[in-house]
């Protein structure tokens, strides 16, 4: 093959690959006709091509695979030394590769020979492999196709702020903040706006429990209001019942990324690369406390990340055919200039949504036990089960609720020098001043009844005796 033919083949392959990546979302077998039509319109709008062109690419791929996407070129077919039915054999080989993409060329030849479609030794591995590659069914093409369907179909960007918030956790520095100065791992929990790449809230913590994620999103909502949906991976912190319940109370929906699909969370993964730059600077700064780590992190976000032009924002607008200033657009600019209004929520409403709730039984000392400590309630609740609510960020403040009782804050149990005589008792336990002794009154009534029965018996006995004497 001369240099011109090599250049032609390379151009055809690259063009076909671009077309394949363009129509990759249409290759989803789960799409119904209506969804496929809408997807085709969206691809045409995003790419600037006509719907007819997109449909032609789609139809060509369904008929001939990768080869159907190549631009046409007048290239003579060299069929020298090939069997007369080679086109049929190639079609069968493509079918075998499509049935099981991992089949090797040797195995395909063996199957064709066993089926009697070609005599043994006629098909050569290198020849069939070359023609499979030209037809778009080489192993490299199949890998490209597989990767294109996984990645390009998952690229997205919401058109406005607060429509989708992505959350994730990244390992931070190890700091001497453990017991007796032991080194302890820190973790960064962040919430990023999908459209503007603006960070709603981000903080380093000394653990990666689910309460860390709750704290992140509670602060994000308090600062910027409610959003439509959030997007997580399936880590244990993000599938926790409490987090789902808290967000549901605020009418915020949750979507989870498919397993092993890091590219679908590309925005926050890209942000984590920026975090790595900060961690390098933090090491140079010789930061040793969690407070100091968060102090400089807040400065880094405000003065650097939010004010630097973001390549992802430029790419988004250029894909829509919108001109972007030479200086670019920063996450702060993109967030603040968005026309979609923020929906701020009352702090009390947000706080109640993120409250944890548990059930405890009040013991005979009018106390409950929570996280290893005893808290005093009210004597009226002795023996009852009560609901306690608390903020995991401040678990020492506990609110106790019970039907018929006004909610109140329980106090930590303290043993004083004297017993508390002022604890109010429930009405059922309060002593009352009796007007009389109902017990003695009842005994007097019984005695009178017994005397009356005795008198009646004596009178009846006399009557019987007199009657007997007359007889």
Image (cartoon, rainbow, N blue to C red):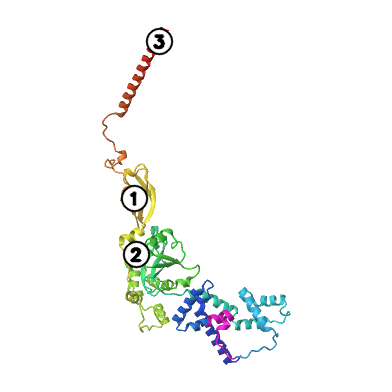
Residue on which disc 1 sits? 401
Inspect the magenta stretch and tell me whether residue 63 lies in it: yes
Residue 76 found in image quarter: bottom right
Residue on which disc 3 sits? 467
Residue 446 found in image quarter: top left
Q: In this rendering, is residue 159 above or below 250?
A: below
Q: Secondary structure at mark 2?
A: helix
Given the current orientation, which residue lies at the most extreme front position? 471
Q: Determine contact: label 3, label 2, CB under 8 Å.
A: no
**Residue 204 in view here:** yes
Q: In this rendering, is residue 333 above or below 232?
A: below
Q: In this rendering, is residue 348 above or below 101?
A: above
Closer to the chain start, of discs 3 and 1, is 1
Is 14 on the left or on the right of 461, as rendered?
A: right
Q: Quadrant of the N terminus?
A: bottom right
Which range of residues does the magenta coloring cover? 56-74
The 10 Å Cα crowd at callout 3, few under 14, some 14 to 19, many 20 or more, is few
Query: Measured from the top left, where is residue 17 in percent x and y?
Result: 53, 82
Q: Quadrant of the C terminus?
A: top left
Closer to the chain start, of discs 3 and 2, is 2
Q: Secondary structure at mark 1?
A: strand
Instruction: Name the residue at 67% across, 81% down.
Output: 89
Q: Secondary structure at mark 3?
A: helix
């Amino acid at each position: 093959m001369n240099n011109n033919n090599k250049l032609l083949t390379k151009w055809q392959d690259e063009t076909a690959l671009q077309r394949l990546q363009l129509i990759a979302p249409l290759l989803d077998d789960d799409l119904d006709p209506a969804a496929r039509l809408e997807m085709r319109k969206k691809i045409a709008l995003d790419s600037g091509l006509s719907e007819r062109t997109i449909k032609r690419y789609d139809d060509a791929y369904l008929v001939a695979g990768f080869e159907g996407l190549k631009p046409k070129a007048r290239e003579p077919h060299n069929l020298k030394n090939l069997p007369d039915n080679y086109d049929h054999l190639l079609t069968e080989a493509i079918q075998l590769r499509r049935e099981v993409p991992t089949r090797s060329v040797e195995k395909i030849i063996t199957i064709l020979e066993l089926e009697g479609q070609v005599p043994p030794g006629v098909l050569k591995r290198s020849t069939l492999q070359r023609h499979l590659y030209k037809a778009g069914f080489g192993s490299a093409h199949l890998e490209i196709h597989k990767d294109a369907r996984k990645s390009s179909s998952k690229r997205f960007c919401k058109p406005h702020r607060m429509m989708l918030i992505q959350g994730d956790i990244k390992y931070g520095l190890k700091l001497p903040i453990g017991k007796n100065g032991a080194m302890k791992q820190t973790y960064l929990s962040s919430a990023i706006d999908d459209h503007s790449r603006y960070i709603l809230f981000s903080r380093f913590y000394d653990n990666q429990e689910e309460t860390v994620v709750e704290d992140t999103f509670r602060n994000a909502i308090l600062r910027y209001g409610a959003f439509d949906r959030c997007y997580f991976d399936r880590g244990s912190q993000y599938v926790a019942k409490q987090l789902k319940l808290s967000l549901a109370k605020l009418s915020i929906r949750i979507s989870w990324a498919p397993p092993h699909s890091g590219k679908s969370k590309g925005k926050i993964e890209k942000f984590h690369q920026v975090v790595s730059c900060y961690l390098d600077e933090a090491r140079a700064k010789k930061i040793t406390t969690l407070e100091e780590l968060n102090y400089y992190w807040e400065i880094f976000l405000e003065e650097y990340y939010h004010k630097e032009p973001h390549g992802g924002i430029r790419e988004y607008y250029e894909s829509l055919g919108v001109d972007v200033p030479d200086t670019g657009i920063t996450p702060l600019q993109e967030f603040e200039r968005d026309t979609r209004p923020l929906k701020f929520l009352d702090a009390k409403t947000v706080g109640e949504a993120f409250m944890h709730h548990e059930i405890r039984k009040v013991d005979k000392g009018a106390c409950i036990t929570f996280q290893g400590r005893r808290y005093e309630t009210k004597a009226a609740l002795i023996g009852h089960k009560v609901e306690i609510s608390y903020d995991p960020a401040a678990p020492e403040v506990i609110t106790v609720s019970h039907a018929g009782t006004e909610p109140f804050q329980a106090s930590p149990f303290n043993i004083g020098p004297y017993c508390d005589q002022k604890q109010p008792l429930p009405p059922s336990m309060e002593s009352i001043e009796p007007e009389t002794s109902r017990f003695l009154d009842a005994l007097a009534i019984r005695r009178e009844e017994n005397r009356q029965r005795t008198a009646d018996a004596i009178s009846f006995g006399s009557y019987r005796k007199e009657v007997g004497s007359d007889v």
